[in-house]
Image (spheres, grey):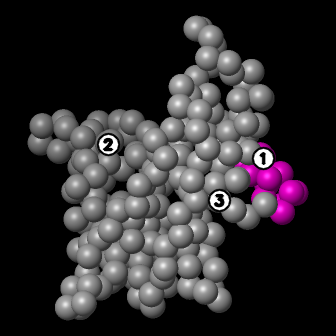
């Protein structure tokens, strides 16, 4: 699915010159459905992908994003200088066949110097481990991001890697884990 998605993204963004994140996701969904011959019938492939597309305009300091199932996080200082994590919701549908057939939505977020943007897969939060073999959970991940966002990204990566390795212990990794961070 990843290889198919990357090929389609290259065709949509580079080949067709489309940069609006929602339009990219709508076209990507159409291409996946067509390539996998998905129509919603029983027994056919239900494959799809969760994905976030971001476009940053450096001239206007605006982030435009659209997302299939994966929320986007932004950490910014509030009026008192304290860091606050804001969660920006995704459309709750995959890029692929779904019983929800509405278009993806682009959202515009004004950016400020020092903002940290995070987009991620569900793999980290869904990893089983800890003393009771439970999921790591989003709240715990959000707290980690908030606590460590000031560190250089290489140090954040090391902390996240060390934490998830310790969390899962001897359990197998259940899904892909990807977390991307950008500082404005």
Is 79 inside the magenta-drawn segment? no
Residue 74 percent location from the top left of the image: 39, 71
Distance between the alpha carbons at the discs numbered 2 and 3: 28 Å
Residue 117 percent location from the top left of the image: 44, 72
Quarter-of-image position of residue 16:
bottom right
Residue at left offset 18%, top offset 36%: 133
Residue 24 percent location from the top left of the image: 70, 53
Tell me, yes or no, whether the two marked residues, 1 and 2, touch with CB atoms within 8 Å. no
Distance between the alpha carbons at the discs numbered 1 and 2: 28 Å
Q: Tell me which label, 3 or 1, sits earlier in the chain.
A: 1
Q: Which residues are magenta?
A: 5-17
Quarter-of-image position of residue 71:
bottom left
Q: Which residue is mark 1?
A: 7
Is 13 inside the magenta-drawn segment? yes
Residue 14 percent location from the top left of the image: 83, 61
Secondary structure beneath dot 1 equals: helix
Q: Which is more toward the observer, 173 or 184?
A: 184
Q: Which residue is mark 2?
A: 127
């Amino acid at each position: 699915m990843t290889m198919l998605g990357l090929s389609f993204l290259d065709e949509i963004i580079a080949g067709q010159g489309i940069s609006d994140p929602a339009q990219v996701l709508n076209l990507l969904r159409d291409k996946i459905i067509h390539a996998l011959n998905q129509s919603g019938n029983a027994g056919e492939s239900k494959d799809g992908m969760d994905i976030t597309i971001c476009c940053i305009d450096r001239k206007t300091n605006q982030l435009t994003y659209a997302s299939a199932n994966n929320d986007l996080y932004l950490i910014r200082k509030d009026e008192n200088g304290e860091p606050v994590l804001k969660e920006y919701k995704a459309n709750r549908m995959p890029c692929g066949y779904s019983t929800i057939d509405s278009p993806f939505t682009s959202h515009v977020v004004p950016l400020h110097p020092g903002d940290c943007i995070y987009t991620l897969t569900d793999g980290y939060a869904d990893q089983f481990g800890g003393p009771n073999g439970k999921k790591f959970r989003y709240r715990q991940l959000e707290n980690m991001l908030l606590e460590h966002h000031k560190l250089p990204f290489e140090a954040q990566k090391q902390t996240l890697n060390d934490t998830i390795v310790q969390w899962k212990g001897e359990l197998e990794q259940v899904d892909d884990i990807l977390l991307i961070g950008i500082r404005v």
